[in-house]
Amino acid sequence: MPHPREDALLASIEARRDEVTALTQDLIRFPTVNPPGDAYRPCAEYLGERLRKRGFQVEYVRAEGSPGDSDAYPRINVIARWEGGRPGPCVHFNSHIDVVSAGEGWTVDPFGGVVKDGKVFGRGACDMKGGLAASVVAVEALIDSGVELPGALEISGTADEESGGYGGVAYLAERGWFSKPRVDHVIIPEPLNVDRVCVGHRGVWWAEIETKGRIAHGSMPFLGDSAIRHMGAVLNALETELYPALAAKTTSMPVVPEGAKQSTLNINSIHGGQREPEGGGLPSPVVADSARIVIDRRFLIEESLEEVKGEVRTLLESLQRNRSGFRYKLRELFEVAPSMTSQDAPVAAETAKAISQVLGREAHFICSPGTYDQKHIDRIGKLKNCIAYGPGLLDLAHQPDEYVAIDDLIASAKVMALSAANLLLS
Ligand SMILES: [Zn+2]
């Protein structure tokens, strides 16, 4: 893009400060809480209607039959496309419109869209209605700039990212919405800070481990076999064998924060023995015949899913061989492969260039410790040119008093507009 045009584009975004603020506020006021997946339709229609008036072709896609989809809570997605004057690539901005529940501890109305001290507050302010608003304003300013653009610009507002994206990006990707030739470059404005380009994320494997025992009277535990003690042996093996092994693994992925640069394991939950009666009272005096844990293993691009599963199986098999009475069940719950776009991919390189131009400092390439919708675009859509870039601090996501700074909305909109322009014009 020639310089005078670039300067005009950036100035026109600067002048849209009130507009990007108001749009973020409006989006926050739709309580699109997931679960259950509330207010998706009005939020999607609000976005679609705005873009339709700007000359976009707007389509609504309900992810029928996806988890949670019902007439009361339809999984509505909106995709808007603006065609340039001649054929060329398509740059797509994808944001999820769902948010997690507000939770406790707010000092402002979580769905009020309060503006204070140069920040917009509310559930979803940073994750990721601020990013959505910035991308809309970026694209509108680019279209208004009068630069003759080839190709197409797309904006989507999609459902259910917070619950895995099956009623949103996964559903659309399965139907070709995130594949060539329709789309060439995807930017997901998740809150990863205005100076960072996120090229991917680690993998995930969730599983439930159950140890089995034999029930008996609690006064004579020697007549039974405690599943909880067997689970203790599992926890001990995780502690002494698996955790040190995971900590020793390193990656070429630029994962942040530093602690996530290794493989990690969280034990999400533990259950065992008889339930205490509702409303107080003592549990029955019996030996536990079952104990369960759910593990959340995050893995690196250098590890295969088979290897990740194999480590846990080996550990359990070894307990079965060496510990008297040890019996277990392993139930796999969920898996996502790691994803990483090359830093040389045009969408990553152009966004990094735009960051240094707008902010006057070098962009950082990072990977996210957790997954987001890039997994579906990569695996299902088979599109490698996908990054996450957007305003807001990841640490504030899902917290009380979540906010996005208005300066960041503007800075990221400038970066998105420049990056999109250069991707279309190059
Ligand atoms: Zn998000």
Image (cartoon, grey):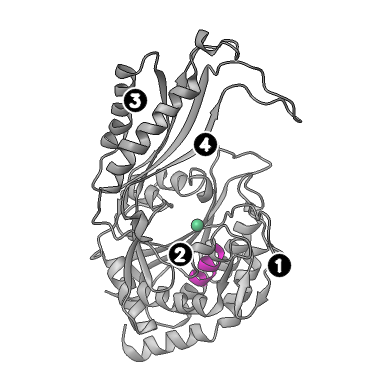
Mark 3 or 4, nearer chain start: 4
Q: On the picture, is 78 further left or further right than 9? A: right
Circle 3 packing at 10 Å, graded few (<14), some (14-19), many (20+), is many
* Residue beneath disc 2: 189
Between 402 and 144, which is closer to the camera in this rendering? 402
How far, Cα to Cα, is label 4 from label 1? 32 Å
Labelled disc at residue 108 = 1
For the point 43% across and 52% down, the residue is: 373
Circle 1 packing at 10 Å, graded few (<14), some (14-19), many (20+), is some
How far, Cα to Cα, is label 2 from label 1? 24 Å
Q: Amino acid at mark 2?
A: Pro
Circle 1 SS class: loop
For the point 65% across and 68% down, the residue is: 26
Q: Amino acid at mark 3?
A: Leu
Circle 2 packing at 10 Å, graded few (<14), some (14-19), many (20+), is many
Q: Amino acid at mark 1?
A: Val
